[in-house]
Structures are given as C-alpha cells and as structure tokens.
Amino acid sequence: MATNSLKSKKIGSHLFIWVLILFTLFPIYVVITSSFNPTGSLATSSLIPQIWSLDNYKVLFNNPAVPYLTWVENSIFLAVANAAISVFVGTASAFAFSRMRFKGRKLGLQALLLVQVFPSFLALAAIYVMMERVYTVFPAIGLGSLGGLLLIYLGGSMGVNAWLLKGYIDTIPMELDEAARIDGASSFQVFWIIFFPLAAPVLAVTALLSFIGTFNEFVLASLFLQDVHSRTVAVGLQQFVGQQFGQNWGPFAAGSLLAAIPLVILFLSLQRFIIGGLTQGATKG
Amino acid sequence: MMYRLAGFTGLKAQIFKISFMAIIDALLIWMFFASMAKEDSSTLSAVIAAIFFFTNLIYFAKFTLPLKFLLPGLILLITFVVVPVAYTIQMSGYVFKTGNEISKADALPQIEANGLTLDDTAPTFDLVLGKVDGKWAALLTSQVDQSVLLATEEKSVVLPAGSYRADDLGIARSTDGFDPVTEDFAANNEESIINLRFPYKDNSFISPQGIDIAAVLTQSLVYDKERDAFTDTASGITYIDNGRGNYAAESDPSMTLTPGWRAWNAFENYTKLLSDPNVRGPFIGVFIWTVSFALISVLMMFAVGLLLAVILNQKIALRRFYRSILILPYAIPSFMSILIWAGMFNRQFGAINALFGTEIDFFNSPTLAKMVILIVNLWLGFPYFYLISSGALQSIPSELEEAAAIDGANNRQIMSKIKLPLILQILSPLLIASFAFNFNNFNIIYLLTGGGPTNVLQGETAGATDILITYTYKTAFGSQEQNLGLASAISMVIFLIVGSISLWSLRRSKVLETM
C-alpha cells in the first residue's frame, strides 16, 4: 500500500512537470515555427509548418520602413546607459547610506523605501506634460528623444537600485575600508579604489537586472518615442501586430526571436547569480 | 593597492575635480540661459538654477561629505520622480481635460470670437482694402443703398457723395488719404485680413469675408469684466463662471460656452470618482477586477511555483534539465511573450484554436478574456515563484525536519505544519511585493487585451479587463477624451493603495527598525 501511493505520487509529480513543460514550451515552439512561416500568421491549418522560408528575417534587414537594427541600437543604448549610470550613481548613494552616519539618514532611508515602491509611470501624465515643456527648450532631452527617456528611466530606477545595493553593501565587511582609512585614504578613495572592485560582482548582477528591465519597458517608450527611427525593439515590434500594420506575425516572431536569444543565453549562464540576488531579499527578511 | 591611489591625491585630484565641476557648471549655466530665453519655462529655469546652486554648494563646501555621494542620485530622484509626483498631485486638483486645456486668459478671447454671428439684417459691402496712415483701412460700399463708409480699426465714417471716386458699378475706389493696396498684396495677406474688425454699430462690426466683400458681424456674447460673466445679447441668457472651468448658463448649468479652461477645483476629480455615475461605475468595476486579478495571479503563481519547488527539490531524474526549461519564461523578455500569447489566442489564425480545431473568440468575451490574462500571467510568473520558493525551502534547516520525523510526523504533516508556515513567513514580503507589482501590471493587460472587450456602443469607457493603471492611461491619453485631471486623481488613489500596502508589509517584516 505504502509503495503503491509512493509510486502514484511519483507518477503524479512527473505528470505535473511534463504538463508544465508543455505549457512552457508551447509559445516558444509557436514563435520559432512562425518566424519561418512566410504566410504571416501564428499557425495556419496545422501546427507543423509545411513551408519554411527566411522571408520574415529578410523583412527585418532589407525593408527601409522597418529599421530593425536601429531599434536594437536604441534599446541597447537605453539599457546599457541606464544600467551603467544607475548602478554607478546608485552605488554612491548606497555607500553613503551604508557606511556613513549622518543626520537624516534614517529618514532618508525610509523615504527611499517609499519612493521605490512607486512605479514611475504612475505619474505618467505629469511626466508627459513636463517633458513636453522641456522639449520646447531642449529638444535633445525632451519628449520624443532617447535622452529624455533615459533621464526618466534613471530617475525611476534610482530608488530601487540604491535600496537593493545598500543591502549588498551592508554585507561587505567594514574592516576593509577601516584599514584603508588608517592608511590615509579619503572617503572617495575608499569608495572608488577599495570598494568598487570588491562589489563588482553584485554590481554586475544589478546592472544586468536593470538592463533586462529597461529592455522590457514598454509603456513610457511607446508614449515617448513616436518617430519610427527612435523606437525601441519593444515599441517597434509591437507595431507589427498592433492596429497599424494588421496582424503581421511573421516578422514580429523573427524579430522577437533574434532579440530574445542573446538575453536568454545571458540569463541562463548567469542564472546562479541572478537567483542569488532574487532570493537574498527573501531569505534575509 | 594604496600605492596606486597615491598618485591621485592632492593637487592632481583637485585639478581633476575643479575641471570636472567647471564643465558641469558651464553646461548648467548654458541650460539656464537657454531656458530663461523661452517664455513659459520659469519652472524649468528654477530647477536648473537649484541644481546649479546645490551642486556647487555641496562639492565645494567642507561639511557635507555624505551629500557628495548622495547628490547625483538625489537630483535624478527629485527631478524625475518627486517633481512628477508633486505635479500629479497638483494636476489632480484641476479640471484639466479635452476642452479645458488652456488658461482662462487664453480662453476668454476664444469665447468672444465664438460668440460672433453674422448679422443678416445688416447690409453686405463691396470692399476695397487699403491703408490710412499705414494702418489697415477699408472703403465699403453698401450693396443695399450704395452708401459709402471709410473704416479704420478705430472708427468708421459715412462719406458724403462726391468725396470719393466710384467706378462704373458705383463701387467706391478711392478717396483722399486712403491708399488702396493691390489685389496681389491683399491675396498674400488674406489671413490677417480675415481677422480685421472695423467698428460698425454697438456690439457689431464689419469684417472682411474675402478680399473684396465684407459683412456685418454681431458680438452676440458680451463679456462683463466686473461680474466675470458673458451675456448673450440675442437670447438674454447670462453665462457665469461655474468654478469648473466653464461659463455656464445661470438658468441651466449644463449649457456651457466653449472653450473651457484649466480651472483649479481641489476636489472636483475626487468627488467625481465617488459620485458621478459615469465615472464611479467603471471605476468600481475596474477596482474590483484589479484586486482580484492581482490576488488570483499571485496565488496561482505561488501554488504552482511552490509545488514545482517541492518536487524538484527531491532527487528525481533529469532534474537540472527540467529546471533549465521551466525557468525560460522568466528569461524571455515579457513584452514579447505577452504579444505572442495574444496572437496564439487569436480567433482566426491563433495556435490555440488551430490546436483544438475551434474558432473561439477569446478576446470578445469578458470571462474568457479574463481567463486568458490569468493563464498568461501564470506562464510569465510561475518560474519566479519557483525560484524564490526553492530558495526558501533550501534555507529551512534540515534539523527541523529530522526532529519532526523523530517525533513521529509523516511527510504530509512536516510539509503542512512545519515547512509551509516557515516558507510563508520567509516569502511574505516577496508575495506582497508581487501583489503590488501585479496591481500595476500595465504590460500584460495593455498588450494582451488592451483592456477589452469594451462595449463602446453602450458608452463604456473602461473595458472588462482594464485594471486601474490601464484605465488611468486610457483616461489620460484616450482617443476620444483626454482627462488629465481625472487620470491624476486615479493615480493618487493607486499611490495611496500601493503605498499603504508596502508600508504595512514593511512594518510587519520589521525592516524599518533594523535600518
């Protein structure tokens, strides 16, 4: 009896896993097959494709109305710049909160905590009106520009990053910077020469999470970037399947696949660090 | 390591710092003057000036070491988060929507212009345009009795016969001091000509209708500055400022003059949320669905993720392989997967209908659309919950399990009485954070269903699957009416809800005390 229930439990477990795996892989299978399907739909009469062609990929690179490479460049610019700057600036703030004692520190931390739970696009209407104004004076950082969007991303990621990084920095032993101080290093030197290299791995993970987050961002980008050449991959590809171009799934699938593959590889190869970062908040809480 | 930095102290570092700050200052000063040169940008100029002031104060004064590290982040946070939030609060106190976008000062002349009507009892005139003392003037010959007027923008006088020269048709062509312009010149200046106003009688004036014809317009809406009211001279109705950005008829408040203006009314938008049936109805419906969507999503993801973690924590074959596949949804950019799912549920050429040989229109039925959203959200979210549950399971010391087993507890009891409560305790901050995230999960709703299905014919403003944040977006940037004031008020409500949930969760986890 006991072995029987154990056996059925085991079968149940495997069944559960395999159902989940099919559930997981189904859309991935569909996107791969439709990227090679020249008819432009996500599945024709059968799920197994009859014709294979590279037409959808050619559209991305040969059609002047579809500046796919420019979109990729824009996305990478925003994601890299946001990740690098926000991690650098965020680390400086986190360093002050973690290592220095000053008036208003606790209040500042509490304020930071509250700010970081508010997604910045809740103030969407205000940001829009504000950047419309900025545009009339400085077009390069106003509405419709990548520079302006970057500034908004930076502001939005500041709270989260500073808060997250402070958690990491607290785990780096104080003795190291104390030793450096005894040797006569200034605060800035401790930060830049001792501390930055030490924290490099966690900074890299934070930067990666920030990179993925920016790459995924859709709301602000779609509202902000109207011109076809300043779009990001997310906004650009969405146009294929939105109202404007009709339901043109082939190029969308091809473009998505090309953009997703490097990210998935990056994610899977760094998964151990990323997961460490995710669960840290939980297990320490 | 210390030796490397030895070269970067003293003078060198000072020079570096000063030149760096000089560049920043030059940039800020340039931005300040560029901004001052434009109209309507005093706030922007003030922000730039403040950044300039604090940057220099903090980097050149001695007493502010922590602020030197905090300042760059602080500037970004204040300029792009705190200021927009403050602006949102301010906007939520304004009637600020399509038809009420401009300032009252800009609205007044437009209302007056809209109050002009063609007077069909008055004659039309043959028009000869010209200049008197370099200013626009007109020689007007009445088409009714051929009497002639010389009009400037200040006054018009009747010319006695003989004081002007007329052509064969009896149309006055010239007179002393009047300098006719050529037809080409008139044609090139048509836009300014159309806006010319020559006084005629009380509340009426002659206005060119082309380059050779003019008619009498009556100012039927007269503005009374002292009472701040408009009176319709034809009907006698008085329109007064209704405090909500419009002039409304005294007798019937629903009769308003256009355009309106952006008016301060602190509670208008908030009371609308609670009392106006056209706003309250959709708002409450959207609110209920938002909460249930976030709650059900988190529960489903957590249930599947935890079960998966329990199974994969045992030693079963192919464990690593399963794991790599099952975290894929978390690695794929979510906007792509959501759009792919949207295509798969398409009625005509979606893979789901192809798989089952059906033609179900998932996105046209409120219930099915909601189910689709929950299924897709489960796909997106269960790997994350698997990862955190797995981490939490591994952090439970095995001694606990052993001790319970010695006391005679079976596997199920160990799970439900010992592990589950512990996991819930460990993960509760993340569960709450996830609830808050899904509460504002714009992408999944907007990209999957667009908030629909929406019964536009019945005048619905919110779709069946709209959550608060997409409803806010539609309110602010909708295709028919854009109501920035109301959208800001809804944003404030969301702020309050999400903020209090987060504060409550932080209190519980005692993070605030250990900072």
Image: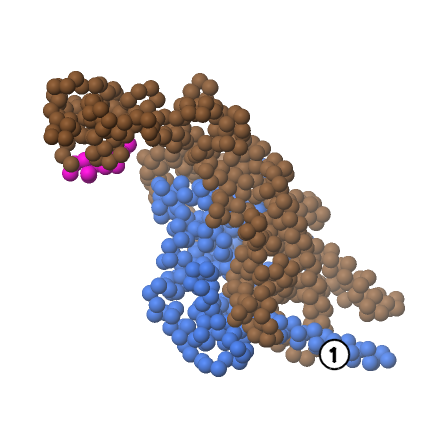
Q: Quadrant of the N terminus of chain A?
A: bottom right
Figure check: B409 above or below A121:
below
Work out whether residue B175 can be spotted.
yes
Of the chain colours in the picture, the one used for chain A is: blue
A141 or B265: nearer the viewer? B265
A271 or A201: nearer the viewer? A271
The chain holding disc 1 is A
Q: Residue at 47% across / 64% down in the picture?
A: A241
Q: Residue at 61% across / 66% down in the picture?
A: B379
Magenta stretch secondary structure, dominant: helix
Q: Is residue B317 magenta?
A: no
Which residue, as the protein is rendered here, is positioned at the far bottom?
A: A50
Provide the letter of the chain coloured brown: B
B401 or A267: nearer the viewer? A267
Secondary structure found at label 1: helix
Q: Quadrant of residue B267?
A: top right
Residues in magenta, as a range: B184-197
Which residue, as the protein is rendered here, is positioned at the far right?
A: B408
Residue A156 in picture, x, y percent from top left: 51, 49
Look at mark 1 in the image and give the residue it sits on. A11
Q: Residue at 78% across / 78% down in the picture?
A: A8
Given the image, on which type of amino acid does mark 1 rest? Ile
